[in-house]
Amino acid sequence: MNTTPYKAGAVAVLGRPNVGKSTLVNALVGTKVSIVSPRAQTTRHRVLGIASVPGGQLLLVDTPGLHRKEHRAMNRHLNRAARGAVTDVHAAMLLVEAGRWTDEDALSYEVCAQAGVPVVLVINKIDRLKDKSQLLPFIANATADRRFEAVHPVSALKANGLDDLVATLLGLLPESAPLYDEDEITDRSSRFLAGELVREQLMHRLGDELPYAAAVEVEEFGEDGDLFRIGVVIWVERDSQKAIVVGRGGEKIKAVGQGAREGMERLFGRKVFLRLWCKVREGWADDENALRRLGYTD
Ligand code: GDP
Ligand code: MG
């Protein structure tokens, strides 16, 4: 008979942009719930990934990275969302990149420490560390004058070290019945995930060309017989940005739409009719009201 009690609770995932938070959440959940990209600032919303593992359930709050510069409404919003994510959790994971400790990592730690939750230091991307002898001094530096419950070197990408990490996290969670069905992977709506898939395609297909101030709004999400009818607007700030998103002869936006539609059909398990537009709205990234309308609310 298994006498280990079932554990369930919320774990915040913190770290500066691009350290691999979304990749780790997806690896723990086992399905893609958070979009990943080689660029910083991919994640703008809190995404709750639900990782059901033997003996427990981790509710992973994937946070936007903290941003040093708060002058734009968007960055202010992102910082509020990241701080909000460490309240009401049982533990926090601070993700850093093996071999690189920056001011932003220190800031993320302070946010966790101030919230008074146990912090687990997760040193990600160890697969990229050429000289393994650097790892111990790196850990010594990172943990000097800071309180961590545990330190776990992992590779989120290659799923190395994750079982030990999960065991540590379960140890920090309260005894509880499962909080969600074991086949649920996120509390985000299909509508939200549809928008995320469009944003991911934009990121992959436009790379560094993608205007920072591009946002995705799902205008229509409805069932029509066996299929979903989905309408998505890509908002940009200037005509010149629209030209980039649409591409010559509409080739870019067409490719984005096709990739996103395929992703939606895989995720929802049914045919999707997707309509995609690009519209210009000046100065939206500076405008708190516009941010609220686009769903960037805490
Ligand atoms: P986030 O901004 O913290 O959510 O970071 P992402 O999860 O979007 O990852 C940023 C980039 O780092 C992507 O290109 C990932 O493929 C890459 N990445 C994440 N984890 C690892 C890892 O363990 N090893 C390597 N080599 N790359 C990783
Ligand atoms: Mg992310």
Image: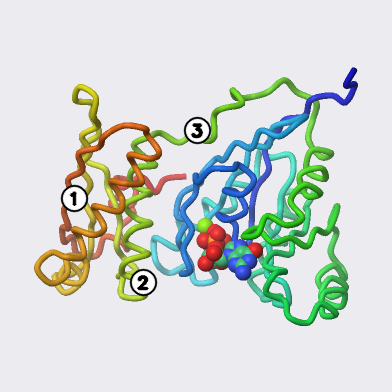
Residue of label 2: 207
Q: How far apart are marks 1 and 3 (CA)?
A: 25 Å
Precedes in sequence: disc 2 or disc 3: 3
Residue visible at 39% across and 42% down in the picture: 193
Residue of label 3: 187
Identify the secondary structure beneath mark 3: loop
Quarter of the view holding residue 285:
bottom left
- Local packing at callout 3 (Cα closer than 10 Å; few below 14, some 14-19, many 20+) is few
Which x, y percent locates residue 129? 72, 76
Say above or below: 40 vs 131: above
Q: Is residue 266 left or right of residue 217?
A: right
Identify the secondary structure beneath mark 1: strand
Amino acid on which the number 2 mark rests in the picture: Gly
- Local packing at callout 1 (Cα closer than 10 Å; few below 14, some 14-19, many 20+) is many
Which x, y percent locates residue 74? 40, 60
Precedes in sequence: disc 1 or disc 3: 3
Mark 3 beta carbon near ligand 2 (under 8 Å) = no
